[in-house]
Amino acid sequence: MNAIATIEPLVRARNVHKSFDQLEVLRGIDLDVAPGEVVVILGPSGSGKSTFLRCINRLETINQGSIEVDGEQIGYSFRKGKLVQLSNHAVALQRRKIGMVFQQFNLYPHMTSLQNIIEAPVGIHGESRKDATENARRLLERVGLSAKADNYPRQLSGGQQQRVAIARALAIKPKLMLFDEPTSALDPELVGEVLATMRDLANQGLTMIVVTHEIGFAREAADRVVFMDGGKVVEQGKPEDVLVNPQHLRTRSFLSRFI
């Protein structure tokens, strides 16, 4: 038995549904992610991948089901046997466990790389500026940008901006990292440097859920590949199984575009 399967999941999603008006985007997602596991979610545009990621971080409210991270149901708590919606402040505290990197870098243009990274630890989580700055410099070194601490976003390439965004997400010391198509806004020649940073994080044992179309990254870095279509998990398994010998016709059709 795979050792990961014997560990209590860090992420546990059950029967997750999400609709926008009459459009049902998620139609009953079940997924467990173990501590230290790297899960790559593939699928066509409109399959619900990014929406599911946003639901994990409570950036979207689910209509049905449950999502737990580190044993806590995100957005809710049980009180006297009933499920009660948490306040925005309580949800913000839950999000301290979760870092997220988006398609767009969303860096503050008037702040340097270093200032962008320390903003949340100091301004939201009450960390001392000295400790946050020391940690930010370590993170910049970790993503290969020690020399860019005092540069503003406009002075950085797209790939460098995204690596600063990764460092910023890591600054809150999350247990889980979510990546929502982190290379989709980059020029092709800049994709590699961001994927290399993500591979390093995976090799260091960080729990990651990655929505991407980068099949090479899925093959090299993922412990498990999940294929979604039509708001459902169609197929999942080891990269060598799903990518090389997919069992579902829809998965085979999707992957044929990349061969």
Image: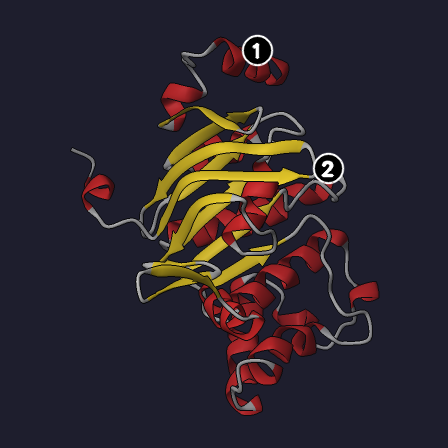
Give the camera-side residue of 221 and 122: 122
Residue 80 falls in which quadrant of the image?
Answer: bottom left
Relative to 132, is 76 on the left or the right? left
Q: Which residue is mark 1?
A: 253
Q: Amino acid at mark 2?
A: Pro
Relative to 171, is 83 on the left or the right? left
The quarter of the image holding the N terminus is: top left
Q: How is the image coloured?
A: secondary structure
Relative to 20, is 32 on the left or the right? left
Q: Are marks 2 and 1 in contact (CB under 8 Å)?
A: no
Residue 171, relative to residue 123: is it above or below? Answer: above
| Residue 256 position within the rendered picture, expressed as x and y whole percent measured from the top left | 58, 12
Q: Which disc number belongs to residue 188?
A: 2
Q: Residue at 74% of width from left, 44% of height from top?
A: 186
Residue 141 falls in which quadrant of the image?
Answer: bottom right
Q: Amino acid at mark 1?
A: Ser
